[in-house]
Amino acid sequence: MPVHPFNGVLPRIDPTAWVAPGAQVQGDVVMGPGSSLWFNVVVRGDVMPIRIGARSNIQDGSIVHVSRGTAATHIGDEVLVGHLAIVHGCTLMDRSFVGLGAVVMDGCVIEPEGMLGAGALLSPGKVIGPRELWLGRPAKKVRLLSDEEVARNALGTAGYVELARLNREAGL
């Protein structure tokens, strides 16, 4: 597994989590049950901690990092982080969603079931409220998510938990 210590601290990955070949995990990282890091993801807890809850997924090519001495990264349970996203020194609460190629900067919070759309840039310190959809560069609130959209995001999370399980069982 591509896991690397930093200053004597080794990442702690739950046995039911899955880290794809080519992903890299370093330092003070804790990864919860059923979570997954996909191909070419980098999770670097070198200068502050990173916590990833249960059944969350960080999709292909994404980067999760921190800011030295000021901003750890906390990712809750059942969080979707889309391909090529950057998650930096922020908090993603339970069931939140970061779209493909989106950027979440230091001090930001995405509250439960909040969503940052594909390609959006959430500038430092912004807060996306529960079920809010934010889009653009810089991102701005567009509307609230419908019940159907929230349910679709939950299905996406469940689908990634299943895909990760299948990959883990296949020995990848």
Image (cartoon, rainbow, N blue to C red):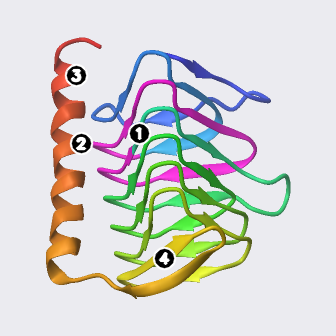
Would you name the residue on which mark 1 appears? 59
At 62% from the left and 57% from the top, the residue drawn is 73
Would you name the residue on which mark 3 appears? 167
Q: How many marks?
A: 4
Secondary structure found at label 4: strand
Would you name the residue on which mark 2 appears? 160
Residue 78: x %, y % from top left: 31, 58
What amino acid is at disc 2?
Tyr
N-terminal label among 3 and 2: 2
Residue 169: x %, y % from top left: 17, 19
The crowd level at tag 2 (other Cα within 10 Å; few <14, some 14-19, many 20+) is many
Is 48 one of the magenta-colored residues? yes
Is 21 one of the magenta-colored residues? no
Q: Determine the CA span between mark 3 and mark 2.
A: 10 Å
Whether the residues at callouts 1 and 2 have beta carbons within 8 Å, the answer is yes
Q: Is residue 2 visible?
A: yes
Q: Determine the CA span between mark 3 and mark 1.
A: 14 Å
At 45% from the left and 70% from the top, the residue drawn is 93
Q: Which mark is residue 134?
A: 4
Residue 109 placement: quadrant: bottom right
Residue 157: x %, y % from top left: 24, 53
N-terminal label among 4 and 2: 4
State which region is magenta: 32-57
